[in-house]
Image (spheres, rainbow, N blue to C red):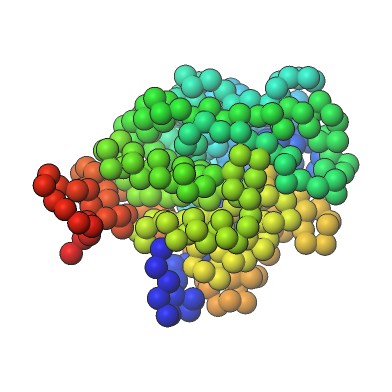
Amino acid sequence: MNFLDDALFPENQEKLVITAAPYGPEWEPNDFVEDIPITMDEQVQKAVDCYNAGATVLHLHVRELDGKGSKRLSKFNEMLARLREAVPDMILQVGGSISFSPEGEGDEAKWLSDDTRHLLAELDPTPDQVTIAINTQQMNLLELMTAEDIRGTSFERPEIAEAYTEMIVPAGPRWVKEHLRRLQANGIQPQFQLAGTHQFETVERLIRQGHYTGPLVLTWVAIGGGSDGPSPYNMMEFIRRVPDGAVLTLESLMRSVLPVSTMAIAMGLHVRCGIEDTLWGPDNKKQSTVEQIEQMVRIAGELGRPVASGKEAREIYRIGETYAGADETLAKNGFAPNRKPGQVGFTHHA
């Protein structure tokens, strides 16, 4: 991304899109009983509260009545139908893991099978987005967590800590290409969750080869444990590599969420917050998802940057937009074009 002399002036930045992640599939209900919704009514009301606070993208997981993360796609269909009524302007983004929480004591924390995750492309009603991982990787949620982060939560239990320390995200080349094909065939925009520049490069290659032909909507996932850590050096290198036509959200973990998000707001990028990412405010006290959203809105206000409405967020994300092939996709997203036969030197758009 290019930062011209006036790029930090709020009048030259897109309005801020705030993604709320209020369902926290890694946490047990007692980890934050005041803020983790259990019943379907509570989960829908949480979405309404997030929207009213200023979030226009909802990162969606579902719980069963026993408080465990739901792995039933019928429950996702039920919730999506309710949300279309309750928050019609919100971008509904289904978490591509479905639920990675362990089934029972001593079980692994794991993403579901390739075939099961493909079925997210057949949800009814159709979500606006499904998040997609690129390249199989470690997802050790505890690597960056401190003793204070997990104090009083289920992560203090050794078997839970072990389950989330050893979690793997399966996302091999065959699965990624097929998943992109199915999502695009059903009009669902993939939201690329990227752990570093190496995964970004894979996405660029997929575009150059014609496997993805739509807007490039990315999240930099700086949670360590297989992903980049929240170092500003990592962050700026990732931002530097992303083309100007992309939409970029910065995501981090625990008490890194607020400083990373503040930098994102100042630079004209977008943010994600909520209890899936952190339970804690800067004072080491628990902070609800709505309180985190309100904090992002206040920071944006101090910097003079308006927050996007639901309609404006859809325009920024280019929901529903598709392109004719690799060449148009590269151009629309700000990449250099593919090399033509016999062409030498650096490629560029005139």
Could you tell me which residue is drawn at 43 percent across and 80 percent down?
Answer: 6
The vertical placement of 35 against 336, above or below, is: above
What is the x, y in percent for residue 138?
Answer: 61, 33
The image quadrant that residue 233 belongs to is bottom right
- Name, please, the residue furthest toward the left: 342
Could you tell me which residue is drawn at 53 percent across and 73 percent down?
Answer: 305
- Name, please, the residue furthest toward the right: 152
Asked if residue 315 lies left or right of residue 296, the reply is left
Residue 52 in view (yes/no): no
* Front in this rendered view, residue 287 or 5: 5
**Quadrant in the picture for the N terminus:** bottom left
* Front in this rendered view, residue 332 or 310: 332
The image quadrant that residue 293 belongs to is bottom right
What is the x, y in percent for residue 204?
Answer: 35, 45
Could you tell me which residue is drawn at 63 percent across and 35 percent down?
Answer: 139
**Quadrant in the picture for the C terminus:** bottom left
What is the x, y in percent for residue 135?
Answer: 48, 34
Asked if residue 255 lies left or right of residue 127, the reply is right
* Front in this rendered view, residue 276 or 3: 3
Number of numbered markers? 0
The vertical placement of 166 against 331, above or below, is: above
What is the x, y in percent for residue 117?
Answer: 49, 25
Could you tell me which residue is drawn at 55 percent across and 58 percent down?
Answer: 235
Residue 227 in view (yes/no): yes
The image quadrant that residue 42 belongs to is top right
